[in-house]
Image (cartoon, helix red, strand yellow):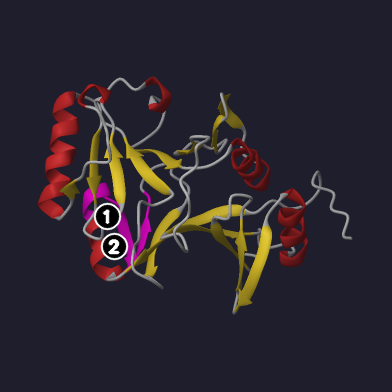
C-alpha cells in the first residue's frame, strides 16, 4: 500500500473544463460568442476574467443521454441584463427547456445547440454575488465528492450545509457546487469533465497516488493523460506536468 503525505504533495490545478461535442467547432463558436471569450483555436476558449481555466470542446464518444451531471449557472446584473442574456443565447442557437423549474424561482433554464443545460440566474443572488459571468459550475453530487475536490484542488470550502457543498479557488472565479442527495444516476460517460495537471516541476505518478488516496479511482492511461473518476464516479483526466 502506498502511503501518501497529502500535506506535501504538489497539488494539481484545474486546466480546462472539457465538453464532449458532436460538432466541437460549432459548439465552441456558440460559447465563445455567448460568453465573449477569446478563441485560442477552433475548439479552445480563453477567459478574459478571473475564471482561471479554459473551456475546450472535444469529439463526443457517445450521444448525449439524459441531463448532464454539471451545468453553468450564469449571473446577471439586472432583470434587463438577464433578459438580454437569454435573448442573445437564443439568437445564437440555444433553446428554452423545462426541467421542472418553478416560475417563482427566477432563473431561466436553457440548453445550448447540443442540449447541454445551463441557467441564467436572476439578479441579486447573494451566493454568486462576488462571481463573474460564470457564477458556478453546479454539479449533482454528494457531500463526499465536494470534500474530495476541495482537497484535490486545495480550494477552500465556501459552503457546507445539509450535505450541499461548494468550493472556490483562492484566486476567485466560479464556484464548484454539489447539491447533495438525491444524486442523479449516471447514464454513461459524462459529457463534461475536468482536465487537471501538476505544476511543471511536479510528479505525475505522485499526484495520481495522492488523488487515489483521497478517494479517486484510476481508470486508464492514454498518451499524456491518465483517466480517473472521483468518488461519485465522475470522470476527469490528469495530464503530464505543465
Number of the label disc, if any, that sits on residue 170: none
Check disc 2 and report its element: helix, strand or loop.
Answer: helix
As rendered, which of 181 and 33 lies closer to the eye? Answer: 181
Q: Is residue 9 left or right of residue 166?
A: right
Q: For mark 2, what is the residue?
A: 28
Could you tell me which residue is drawn at 41 percent across and 73 percent down?
61
3D distance between C-alphas at marks 1 and 2 = 5 Å
Q: Is residue 42 magenta?
A: yes
Tell me if residue 122 can be seen. yes
As rendered, which of 128 and 103 lies closer to the eye? Answer: 103
- Number of marks in the image? 2
Residue 40: quadrant of the picture: bottom left
Tell me if residue 18 can be seen. no
Q: For mark 1, what is the residue?
A: 31
Residue 64: quadrant of the picture: bottom left
| Above or below: residue 18 compared with residue 48 | below
Q: Is residue 141 magenta?
A: no
Q: Is residue 45 left or right of residue 111?
A: right
Could you tell me which residue is drawn at 48 percent across and 47 percent down?
52
Q: Are marks 1 and 2 in contact (CB under 8 Å)?
A: yes
**The residue stretch that appears in magenta:** 32-47
Q: Position of residue 49 (x, y in %)?
A: 38, 43
As rendered, which of 219 and 132 lies closer to the eye? Answer: 219
Q: Is residue 90 left or right of residue 47?
A: left
Q: Is residue 3 left or right of residue 18?
A: right
Amino acid at each position: 500500500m502506498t502511503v501518501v503525505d497529502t500535506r506535501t504533495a504538489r497539488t494539481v490545478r484545474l486546466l480546462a473544463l472539457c465538453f464532449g461535442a458532436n460538432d466541437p467547432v460549432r459548439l465552441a463558436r456558440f460559447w465563445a460568442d455567448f460568453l465573449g471569450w477569446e478563441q485560442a483555436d477552433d475548439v479552445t476558449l480563453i477567459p478574459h476574467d478571473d475564471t482561471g481555466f479554459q473551456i475546450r470542446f472535444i469529439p463526443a464518444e457517445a450521444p448525449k443521454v439524459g441531463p448532464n451531471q454539471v451545468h453553468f449557472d450564469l449571473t446577471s446584473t439586472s432583470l434587463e441584463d438577464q433578459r438580454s442574456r437569454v435573448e442573445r443565447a437564443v439568437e445564437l442557437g440555444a433553446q428554452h427547456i423545462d426541467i421542472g423549474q418553478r416560475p417563482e424561482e427566477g432563473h431561466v433554464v436553457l440548453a445550448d445547440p447540443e442540449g447541454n443545460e445551463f441557467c441564467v440566474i436572476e439578479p441579486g443572488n447573494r451566493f454568486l454575488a462576488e462571481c463573474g459571468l460564470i457564477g458556478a459550475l453546479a454539479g449533482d453530487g454528494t457531500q463526499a465528492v465536494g470534500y474530495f475536490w476541495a482537497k484535490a484542488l486545495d480550494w477552500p470550502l465556501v459552503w457546507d450545509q445539509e450535505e450541499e457543498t461548494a468550493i472556490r479557488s483562492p484566486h476567485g472565479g466560479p464556484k464548484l457546487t454539489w447539491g447533495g442527495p438525491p444524486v442523479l444516476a449516471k447514464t454513461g460517460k459524462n459529457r463534461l469533465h475536468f482536465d487537471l495537471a501538476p505544476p511543471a516541476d511536479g510528479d505525475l505518478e505522485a499526484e495520481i497516488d495522492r488523488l487515489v488516496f483521497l478517494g479517486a479511482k484510476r481508470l486508464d492511461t492514454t498518451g499524456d493523460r491518465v483517466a480517473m473518476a472521483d468518488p461519485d464516479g465522475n470522470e476527469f483526466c490528469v495530464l503530464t506536468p505543465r
